Image: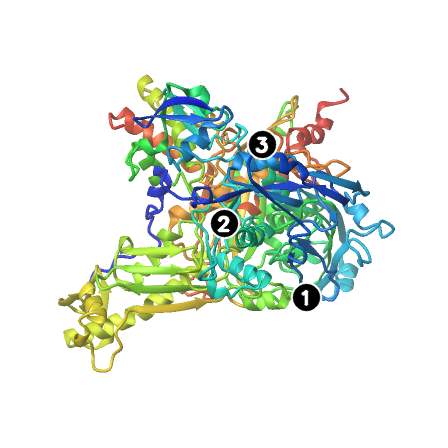
């Protein structure tokens, strides 16, 4: 008889973390309160480009309460250094507090501390900064005009970095082409906007020289390393804690100057210091995203084969480089991913980041790929239209079908379901396509269908970062699994959970390997004191790499449990199975011993252990990503309905067919996909961070910066195909970002389809739709 | 400073506040209610929603001094430390939350809506449910799971369960 072995991986387990989140007992950064704590308020630049003539803090002396004020003079030499080691890249640093010059509205110029947050804010308003304003660099065109002055001394121009990637023979592709299709596409600047803003609390114990920093971050270990290097403190004496984090989406996946600054202030003042970002600060001065322009030129044969692609890519980076992905990361990613899921072998991309007087571009869900896929998939529709082909047929003709596939840049794609997902989507949309065609004759209401087909390189490994010479340097995730004498399991995980359900999914993974229930597994994360060094949660690596690390560490632990069980049950270790909290002899389930007895033997009744075995039950594993990552794939589809007289667009239907390999928990996977999609809908239709010609931000609250709200969003239909990858231990591919990648392209294609126009940019808000539908309202 | 008396989650307390102190800050700091979250502090996200005399109110747009003599409920009082209320359980089963930051605001906004539907003995359609949450922003879930949770909670209530 065989022990009945429940499988937790793949089960729709409800999340353990929900109880504290639902009951109001979660602890976010603003819930960290320490005795004697000082509150920090920033004085931020209100002009985009200026020399600082003088900072006058004298008014603070007249206040009847105590304040502490610091400027760039006090923090001189401390800065954020985020440089990719390319010879072509121009070097810059962002001082923790501006030194001599400000380069965007919102840049920190001074800080004021007080014993009450209201007072700190009052006092900060009394600091007077005298600026000598300078002309701004406000557009990509200005940034590329080498006659205009550079933002940094010693720079030759405002092009921060320009590089090329190529493969195959593009000239030959061009010569063979029957059609050359050239288009320019752009995606707007936006913000990331987790509902919890950022925040930092720090406290320094002078006696033991121990610094503790709480930060709403996705990467506590990297924050620790950066602080250690910048403040010259041993890493062993720094503890960084990410408490409950109210959404990250990549925004909190960089090390920020304020994290270093608050730590420095705690050391300097000898008192705990707290800073909580407000929404305006978040919108103007954390990081921004997207703001791309791509010019693509496709070479296509007479029968509709894609022969080659040429790309010219510009990203408006803003003033500074963010750590650890740098200003070179965003344009480089576009260059790397544009070949996408299509089979062609001639490619050349020139990509650059340019500096302007704006907030820096950083990583936000999808990182460059929503823009790249927007251009790639708009182009596919534009080509299909030019050739008179159906968008599905054109894609199916060019889609990659053989795996592993070596793409034009030499990246190896592991197996996916590219053609199958397109075909499945085609079937799901059949009725909408018919309805859209029929609406062509209507002068008042048009229906449009659009798709976006894409792949996503996920769970990148160290070789990928080495190749890019980027300061992140590595991509592994570590897990330590430990069993206590009562048989309960603790996982100390190098990931940080900010909504992904890791406290549940990782327990499911360990439970399968150890033969216990997920309820018996307690997952700890986000605290450098307890968790092994790791890069944190970003880049769609949680399930694939974190899950892999937990799985392999748990198997090591299981092997020891089996050896002890075999000894006590007088069997061989390979005859032992772990299930339902017991260790059984296979085919003789009446011979069993509870796992908690094995745990007790391993840790307390050690006289029961086999001769020579060391006591203890713990195991550790580091899981790096595959050399080229593992490629998830998906097709997104949007069905829109446009009211021609008003230009109002309704998103009627949004459908996803996706393949992220092995699914650890369908509840969580569906949630990640749907949440990502709605962020993508935000990028496609609503969100736009706007600067005026002087680089003054105009969208500094939710009244101006429009977020996707429930009434505008349909239910999101999700269909799965599971193609497990051989490249990660559980067959899982990354999925956290994919949802956000396709919507802009799918919605734009639906609009183009509905209105029979070219669509070259987002956001497709009511204004944009009004303009695009002008021709259908006649001469009026 | 102004002396005010508030009854918060059934407990009455008199305290001194500055006229400008926000109800959200007072609930968080003086009453230790960490379930009151601030997402924007300008009345646009709903994260800070609490019940003031049984009506959902944005505690970031309300001064504590305005609330003298009022009865206030926050998410902590809804289903206890294990979140047992039917709506909370529906959020759990329908995956109506991810990071959880917006969640207390959604719960406090939606509870009266659900009670009203149950009273009227009808199941609202999805458009109506979405309209009921149009003052709350969730960045994580895409609203799908929240809509499903409301549907489930109303259904339960109609079956006499709530
Ligand atoms: S915090 Fe009150 S509405 Fe956003
Ligand atoms: S669950 Fe994160 S904002 Fe709603």
Q: In what element is the residue under mark 1?
A: loop
Ligand 1 within 8 angstroms of badge 3 C-beta: yes
Q: In what element is the residue under mark 3?
A: loop
The tag earlier along the polypeptide, 2 or 1, is 1
Q: Position of residue A78 (x, y in %)?
A: 64, 57
Q: Is residue A351 left or right of residue A259?
A: right
> Distance from label 2 to label 1 (Cα)?
38 Å
> Distance from label 3 to label 1 (Cα)?
38 Å
Q: Is residue A407 above or below residue A247?
A: below
Q: Position of residue A681 (x, y in %)?
A: 56, 38
**Residue annotated with mark 2:** A271
> Distance from label 3 to label 2 (Cα)?
34 Å
Q: In what element is the residue under mark 2?
A: loop
Q: Is residue B115 above or below residue A288?
A: above
Ligand 1 within 8 angstroms of badge 2 C-beta: no
Q: Position of residue A562 (x, y in %)?
A: 24, 72
Q: Is residue A273 above or below residue A644?
A: below
Disc 3 residue crowd, few under 14, some 14–19, many 20+, Cα 10 Å: some
Chain ID at mark 2: A
Chain ID at mark 1: A
Disc 2 residue crowd, few under 14, some 14–19, many 20+, Cα 10 Å: some
Q: Identify the mark at residue A702; answer none if there is no mark.
A: 3
Q: Identify the mark at residue A259; answer none if there is no mark.
A: none
**Residue annotated with mark 1:** A85
Q: Is disc 1 on the same chain as disc 2?
A: yes
Q: Residue at x 40, y 52 (%)?
A: A502
User: Quadrant where the C terminus of chain A lies?
Assistant: top right
Q: Is residue B133 left or right of residue A433?
A: left
Chain ID at mark 3: A
Ligand 2 within 8 angstroms of badge 1 C-beta: no
* Nearest the eye: A592 or A107: A107
């Amino acid at each position: 008889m065989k022990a009945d072995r429940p499988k937790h991986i793949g089960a729709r387990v409800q999340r353990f973390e929900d109880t504290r989140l639902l009951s109001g007992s979660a602890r976010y950064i603003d819930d960290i309160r320490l005795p004697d704590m000082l509150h920090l308020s920033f004085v931020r630049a209100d002009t985009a480009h200026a020399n600082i003539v003088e900072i006058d803090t004298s008014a603070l002396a007249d206040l009847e309460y105590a304040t502490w004020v610091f400027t760039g003079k006090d923090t001189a030499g401390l800065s954020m250094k985020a440089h990719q080691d390319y010879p072509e890249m121009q070097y810059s640093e962002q001082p923790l507090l501006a030194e001599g010059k400000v380069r965007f509205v919102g840049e920190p110029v001074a800080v004021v501390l007080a014993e009450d947050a209201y007072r700190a804010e009052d006092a900060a308003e009394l600091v007077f900064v005298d600026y000598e304003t300078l002309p701004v660099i406000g557009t990509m065109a200005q940034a590329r005009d080498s006659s205009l002055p550079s933002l940094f001394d010693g720079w030759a121009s405002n092009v921060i970095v320009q590089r090329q990637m190529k493969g195959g023979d593009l000239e030959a592709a061009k010569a063979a082409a029957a059609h050359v299709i050239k288009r320019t596409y752009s995606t707007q600047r936006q913000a990331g906007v987790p509902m919890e803003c950022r925040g930092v609390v720090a406290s320094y114990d002078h006696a033991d020289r121990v610094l503790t920093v709480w930060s709403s971050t996705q990467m506590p270990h990297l924050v620790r390393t950066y602080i250690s290097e910048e403040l010259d403190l041993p890493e062993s004496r720094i503890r960084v804690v990410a408490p409950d984090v109210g959404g990250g989406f990549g925004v909190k996946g960089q090390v920020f100057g304020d994290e270093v600054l608050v730590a420095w202030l705690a050391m300097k003042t000898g008192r705990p210091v707290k800073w909580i970002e407000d929404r305006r600060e978040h919108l103007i001065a954390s990081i921004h995203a997207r703001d791309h322009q791509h010019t693509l030129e496709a070479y296509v044969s007479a029968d509709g084969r894609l022969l080659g692609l040429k790309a010219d890519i510009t990203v408006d980076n803003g003033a500074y480089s963010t750590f650890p992905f740098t200003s070179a990361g965003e344009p480089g990613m576009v260059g790397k991913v544009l070949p996408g899921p299509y089979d062609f072998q001639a490619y050349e991309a020139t990509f650059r980041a340019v500096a302007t007087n704006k907030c820096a571009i950083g990583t936000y869900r999808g990182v460059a790929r929503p823009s790249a896929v927007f251009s790639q998939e708009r182009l596919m529709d534009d080509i299909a239209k030019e050739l008179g082909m159906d968008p599905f047929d054109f894609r199916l003709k060019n889609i990659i079908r053989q795996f592993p596939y070596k793409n034009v840049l030499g990246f190896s794609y592991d197996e996916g379901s590219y053609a199958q997902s397109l075909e499945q989507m085609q079937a799901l949309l059949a009725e909408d396509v018919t309805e859209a065609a029929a609406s062509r004759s209507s002068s008042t209401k048009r229906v449009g269908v659009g798709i976006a087909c894409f792949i996503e390189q996920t769970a990148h490994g160290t070789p990928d970062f080495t190749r890019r010479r980027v300061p992140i340097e590595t991509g592994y995730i570590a897990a330590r699994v430990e069993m206590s004498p009562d048989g309960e399991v603790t996982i100390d995980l190098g990931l940080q959970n900010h909504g992904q359900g890791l406290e549940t999914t990782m327990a499911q993974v360990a439970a399968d390997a150890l033969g216990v229930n997920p309820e018996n597994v307690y997952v700890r994360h986000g605290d450098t004191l307890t968790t092994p060094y790791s890069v944190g949660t970003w880049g769609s690596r949680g399930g694939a790499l974190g899950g892999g690390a937990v799985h392999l560490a748990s198997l090591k632990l299981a092997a020891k449990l089996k050896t002890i069980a075999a000894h006590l049950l007088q069997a061989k270790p390979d005859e032992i199975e772990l299930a339902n909290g017991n260790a059984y002899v296979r085919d003789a389930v009446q011979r069993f011993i509870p796992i908690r007895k094995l745990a007790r033997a391993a840790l307390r009744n050690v006289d029961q252990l086999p001769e020579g075995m060391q006591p203890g039950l713990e195991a550790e594993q580091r899981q790096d990503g595959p050399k080229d990552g593992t490629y998830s794939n998906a097709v997104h589809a949007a069905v829109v309905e446009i009211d021609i007289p008003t230009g109002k667009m309704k998103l009627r239907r949004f459908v996803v067919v996706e393949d992220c390999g092995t699914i650890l928990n369908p509840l969580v996977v569906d949630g990640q996909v749907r949440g990502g999609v709605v962020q993508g809908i935000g990028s496609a239709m609503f969100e736009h961070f706007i600067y005026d010609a002087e680089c003054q931000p105009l969208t500094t609250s939710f009244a101006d910066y429009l977020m996707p709200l429930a009434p505008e969003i349909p239910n999101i239909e999700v269909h799965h195909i599971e193609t497990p990858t051989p490249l990660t231990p559980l067959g899982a591919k990354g999925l956290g970002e994919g949802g956000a990648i396709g919507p802009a392209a799918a919605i734009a294609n639906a609009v183009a389809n509905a209105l029979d126009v070219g669509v070259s940019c987002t956001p497709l808000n009511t204004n944009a739709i009004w303009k695009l539908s002008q021709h259908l309202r006649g001469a009026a | 400073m102004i002396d005010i008396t508030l009854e918060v989650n059934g407990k009455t307390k008199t305290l001194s506040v500055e006229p400008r102190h926000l109800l959200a800050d007072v609930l968080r700091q003086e009453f230790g209610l960490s379930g009151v979250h601030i997402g924007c502090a300008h009345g646009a996200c709903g994260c800070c929603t609490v019940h003031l005399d049984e009506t959902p109110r944005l505690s970031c747009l309300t001064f504590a001094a305005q609330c003298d003599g009022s009865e206030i409920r926050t998410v902590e009082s809804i289903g206890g430390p294990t979140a047992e209320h039917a709506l909370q359980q529906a959020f759990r089963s329908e995956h109506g939350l991810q990071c959880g930051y917006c969640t207390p605001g959604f719960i406090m906004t939606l509870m009266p809506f659900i009670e009203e539907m149950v009273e009227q003995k009808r199941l609202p359609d999805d458009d109506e449910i979405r309209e009921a949450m149009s003052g709350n922003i969730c960045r994580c879930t895409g609203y799908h799971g929240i809509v499903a949770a409301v549907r489930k909670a109303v259904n339960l209530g109609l079956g006499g369960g709530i």
